[in-house]
Image (tube, rainbow, N blue to C red):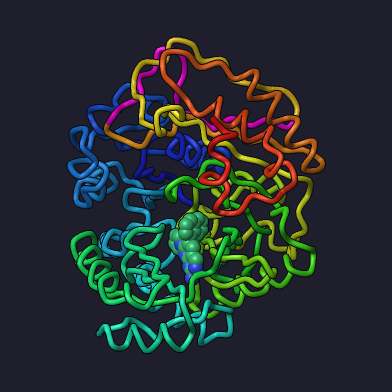
Amino acid sequence: MFDKILVANRGEVALRVMRAAKELGVKTVAVYSTEDEDTLPVRYADEAVCVGPAPANQSYLVIPNIIAAAKNTGAQAIHPGYGFLAENADFARACVDNDLVFIGPSADCIESMGDKATARETMMACGVPTVPGSDGVCDTVEEARSFASSVGYPVLIKATAGGGGKGMREVHDPADLEAQYKAARTEAGAAFGNDGVYLEKLVLNPRHVEVQILADDFGNHIALCERDCSIQRRHQKLVEEAPSPALTDDLRRAMMVAAVKAVRAVDYRNAGTIEFLLDERGEFYFMEMNTRVQVEHPVSEMVTDTDIIKEQIRIAAGEPISCADRAPFAPNGHAIEMRINAEDPENGFRPCPGTITKFVVPGGPGVRVETYVGEGARISPYYDSMVAKLIVHGQDRDEAIARAKRALDEFQIEGIATTIPFHKRVMDNATFIAGDATTAFIPNEMGDLL
Ligand code: MV4
């Protein structure tokens, strides 16, 4: 095991990683921007190094500064958390070049899954179901048109360097194809410096269901059940749950088998997620692979009784996954995560940074709160607006929902607007309670949710 690791992140995930390290007897180094000097993860770490001013592109994203902090403190490995440098292949390479272990997959894996058209082709080649689509990127509008007419409209144009919904264009009418194709390429080129686009048949009203996987150096490739993340607003997840209320046991097993096949095909190591679209007929298709730990990993931990971050550190240290003997996993009970953001749902989820004047967290059976703030903390306008994650676990979905409502009532945050009132409405919404929420949930139910 490592003696000391550096956590290249901030906020709740930095604290989450440090807690896992502490349980493993591993010392931690925090990095921080001047803006974050007075935050809990900086105080919690054994050592802390300032890596620059508030803007992330001058601090948390500056690879040489992070590497220097690790070398100067004698850290042996770096955990990137999520966001910032977590899916940056150059950063993973810089770690290796400086004799530091990157706690994640290889740089080559990050790169190949980061190119969405390549990832799609890799999955097709190994027999993981994909949505009917173009073979690789469409270099000309003629290619795009011939593909679209062969599978039929509507189609979705996606940026190969995109992901997470950036640079996507729906085309419902052949007359719009050329304009949308050109617009998508221009947009992708400006956003990613790569204007490659590919096409897929548009899946109507899909659910977003993703499988958490772990893979070590000993040939263990295991799936920790699935998460349903259909409740999103503009590609920002707000509520995630495990297991998905839309899966039968047979469908769950099939999805876990497909996810394991996918990670074996790319010789993946460490934690990752295979995202699937689930259509109204119960067919699922590979969408993207995330080569990092995700915000919503706790719901998987709750229903599999695992610690995904500790497993990540063990795998990176060359140890076997400690829960491999418990695979294949069947979900134990039901977990729901609600993202508590400093945003005002009544005003288009406008970010509301500011000072927290009151902060009372819920507790009791089946309640977990992941946060890095307390009374008097200031939510910075420089970073994302998530202040806490409320995770509840129950024997079944009904108990989890009852706990969620009870915990939301106990949660008191004053001084800033938050998404707590929105989550209370979601937990009372008939479509959600029935387990019928698709990716259209928020747009369709907005009237009921505000
Ligand atoms: C799709 C789709 C429908 N059909 N692909 C959104 C994010 C990116 N990962 C891919 N996304 C989608 N891909 C096909 N062929 C619908 C979406 C989509 C979506 C997916 C998951 C969760 C929320 C979403 C919201 C809008 C669109």
Image x and y of residue 371, in percent: 50, 29
Residue 415 is inside the magenta segment: no
Identified at 40% across, 12% down, the residue is 376
The answer to whether residue 307 is seen in the rendering is yes
Q: Is residue 387 left or right of residue 363?
A: left
Which of 199 and 191 lies nearest the eye of the viewer? 199
Image x and y of residue 360, in percent: 56, 15
Image x and y of residue 111, in percent: 34, 70
Q: Is residue 262 above or below residue 36?
A: below
Q: Is residue 26 above or below residue 159?
A: above
Residue 378 is inside the magenta segment: yes
Q: Is residue 11 above or below residue 113?
A: above
Identified at 23% across, 52% down, the residue is 63
Identified at 39% across, 62% down, the residue is 163
**Residue stretch rendered in magenta on the structure:** 366-381
Identified at 76% across, 31% down, the residue is 402
Which of 389 and 12 lies nearest the eye of the viewer? 389
Write down the quadrant of residue 148 in the picture: bottom left
**Tally of numbered tags:** 0
Q: Is residue 59 above or below residue 117?
A: above
Which of 76 and 144 lies nearest the eye of the viewer? 144
Write down the quadrant of residue 427 in the picture: top right
